[in-house]
Image (cartoon, rainbow, N blue to C red):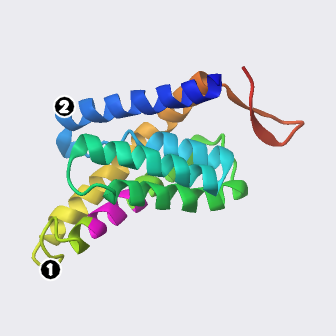
Amino acid sequence: MPRFLLSAAIVVVAVMAQIVGDRAAAPLGLDFLVLPVVFMSLRRGSEVGAGWGFVCGLCHDMVGGGVLGAHAFGKALAGGLLGRLSHRFDRNSPLLQALATAAGALVSTSAAVLLRTALGAEGSLLSTPLLRIGGLVLATTVSSAVIGPPGFWALVRLSGWRYRDGEGKWRFYA
């Protein structure tokens, strides 16, 4: 039960940070909700990462408006893909954390934009300026790479997930 409450608290804090980030720094394209998705996919694998991606993406859709399910699809896809690759890398490396967060934001934002465009929410892809779409994806990717390592540090400290060398796995230690 404490892990469930902690997970819910992490999502609530990420949603609140997303609301503040959207209002205060809209041109930067900050995506705080990709942090818990990437964190859990690197720690627990593709199934858990996709589930966290769906929940965080659905929260992003409800807070941000637009097509319901577009960010949920994008973040679930990002969580699943990063979870499949997670066992191949050192998860404690700040460089990997920055690159994984940037990759998660890239996949998530690109999939959400393409899905919204396919559903007609942003006009057709050919009529939408590609520079605007590319700028949004690039800004989100770069800003997520910058906030990735500090976000991972905070999530490791708050969540209780620790890596013990003798066991070779990430486990929850209270």
Q: Is residue 87 left or right of residue 168?
A: left
- Amino acid carrying label 2: it is Ala
Viewed as shown, does residue 164 lie left or right of 100? right
Give the side of residue 131 with respect to residue 55, left or right.
left
* Magenta stretch, residue numbers: 107-115
Mark 1, residue position: 126
How far apart are the alpha carbons under marks 1 and 2? Answer: 30 Å
> Taking 2 as reference, is 128 above or below it?
below
Mark seen at residue 101: none
Q: Residue at 42% x, 44% y: name it.
A: 56
Earlier sequence position, callout 1 versus callout 2: 2
> Disc number at residue 24?
2
Instruction: Give the SS element for disc 2.
Output: helix
Residue 62 at x, y = what percent?
28, 44
State the SS at label 1: loop
Amino acid residing under circle 1:
Leu
- Location of the N terminus by quadrant is top right
Q: Is residue 109 magenta?
A: yes
Which image quarter: residue 174?
Answer: top right
Q: Is residue 58 above or below residue 83?
A: above
The quadrant where residue 86 appears: bottom right
Q: Residues within 10 Å of mark 2 (few under 14, many from 20)?
A: few
